[in-house]
Image (tube, helix red, strand yellow):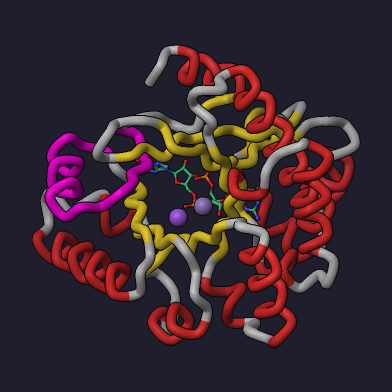
Amino acid sequence: LGLETDLRRALERGELELYYQPLVNLASGEIESFEALMRWRHPERGLVPPTEFIPVAEDTGLIVPIGRWALQEACRQISAWQAQFPQRRPKVSVNVSAVQFAQPDLAEAVLQSLATARLEARYLKLEITESVLMDGSDAVRAMLERLQGEQIEFLMDDFGTGYSSLSYLHRFPLDILKIDASFVRRMDVEARHDEIVQAIVALARSLNMTVVAEGLETVTTLARLRELNVAFGQGFLFSRPLDAESAGRLLASGR
Ligand code: G
Ligand code: G
Ligand code: MN
Ligand code: NA
């Protein structure tokens, strides 16, 4: 209960921050985009990871204003980096939960965030999980189509961990598939995991989806993913999630 009360005030008090983890083009080694990952700088608890407060935010509905802030802040930051690094033009992906998708004005909020930041829609991507598609109403479909029509790309996050993955992928054509870290992390030591990754890559290819491997931690795995023609990777091998200043330095370093 203390957490909920604190979380309610966290936004007003400016205690929420976005960290940024690069998604790297595995062929060129260049940063293609950053995933925005929320952190809560709690006055007593220190830096609280999202796994400890996002579920509470979802249960209480606080995810709606918090998620709106995240969209605005991510658009503002990426727009600032684009001005600072015009030859890099990084994109940003923002996590959007099912509760946010159930809001009829989500599309408006997304487009508003872009407009305020003067950011072109094609530089924003939204990460959703299967739970969004499981709510699979016509309203969700209409919202997806509207935003995709604006050139916003959608990523299926945590792929392989949910239910009935295949039917959702078939019914909702998303752009990018993120292979869950739990498969990628151990593919260099467990043949079974390598096989699962191969199967997901083949599936993505047949559905015309771009693949991102998350949880990329070793050079062995990097070499294997290149061999499988996986387009993008994200993980501790390249970088942990960084505060905005450090992520800016990474861009400045020319990586
Ligand atoms: O950064 P970390 O790996 O601890 O993030 C854990 C999970 O928290 C992520 O998988 C992500 O789905 C979720 N998360 C992080 N930031 C946000 C956010 O801004 N909005 C929502 N809805 N979820 C987030
Ligand atoms: O749920 P989602 O995939 O949106 O969140 C990504 C989470 O995975 C982040 O919290 C991030 O800290 C974590 N993460 C990112 N890269 C790695 C990695 O290489 N290894 C491990 N173990 N975790 C990672
Ligand atoms: Mn994500
Ligand atoms: Na994930």
Tell whether position 67 is magenta. no
Q: Quadrant of the C terminus?
A: top left
Of 196 and 231, nearer the camera is 231
Q: Residue at x 72, y 44 (%)?
A: 70
* Residue 187, quarter of the rendered image: bottom left
Of 132 and 76, nearer the camera is 76
Classify 130 as above or below 211.
below
Classify 99 as above or below 232.
below
* Residue 158, quarter of the rendered image: bottom left
Q: Residue at x 21, y 68 (%)?
A: 196
Give the extent of the magenta segment: 217-237
* Residue 180 location (% of width, % of height): 37, 58
Classify 13 as above or below 92.
above
* Residue 252 location (% of width, % of height): 49, 14
* Residue 211 location (% of width, % of height): 34, 57
Of 47 and 215, nearer the camera is 215
Q: Quadrant of the N terminus?
A: bottom right
Q: Residue at x 72, y 69 (%)?
A: 101
